[in-house]
Image (cartoon, rainbow, N blue to C red):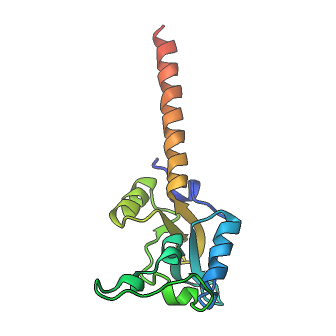
Amino acid sequence: MPTKVSEYMTRKVVTIQPDTGLREAFFLMRDNAIRHLPVTNIDGELIGFISDRELRRPGWVDESPDIGHEYDLTDDLNVGDVMVKDIIHVRTYDTLSKAVGTILNHNISAAPVLDKTGQLVGMLSAVDLLSAFQDTLESQKTNKNKNKKALA
C-alpha cells in the first residue's frame, strides 16, 4: 500500500493571522525554526501562505524592471499584504508520490496539509520528504540483507 502524506507530515502547525506585521512574522519563523507559515483567519480557515521568501523580498518590490521600490522588513506591512493567496496544498490521504509531484510541479519547498473536510492539519516540507526517502532507503537495505541471508 502506498505511503500517505499523513504518515510523514509535521503535525505541529504554527499559523499566523493576516493582520500580523511582517517583522513579527519573521521573528515567529525564527523562534520556531520554520520557513513557512499558513495564514488563517480568526476562524482558523486557511486563507494564505507566507514563506521566508516573501519576507526577504516580496514580488511587488520588483514588479517592473525600470522601477525599484525600497523595502525594509518592518511592521508597516502586514502578512496579508504579501501572502500568497493561491495556495498549493496536499491532502492527508494523498500518496507521497502525488505530494512530491505537486511540490515539484509548483517549485515549492512545503505545502499545507488539509484533511478531507478542508481543515489545516499539518505541513509537508522537503525535510519531511527526505525523512520518508531515508526510511525507504533503510527498508531497501534491510530487505537486501535479508535476501542475502536467505540465499546463504
Is 60 in front, or is 107? 60
Is 147 in front, or is 38? 38
Percent of width and height locating residue 128: 55, 54
Outermost residue toward the top? 152
Percent of width and height locating residue 106: 36, 67
Does residue 118 appear anywhere in the picture? yes
The residue under the point 33% across, 89% down is: 67
Residue 136 vertical position relative to residue 118 in the rendered view, above or below: above
Q: Quadrant of residue 11?
A: bottom right
Percent of width and height locating residue 143: 50, 26
Is 111 in front, or is 3? 111
Residue 124 vertical position relative to residue 87 in the rendered view, above or below: above
Does residue 14 appear anywhere in the picture? no
Percent of width and height locating residue 81: 51, 90
Residue 121 vertical position relative to residue 128 in the rendered view, above or below: below
Marks counted in the figure total 0
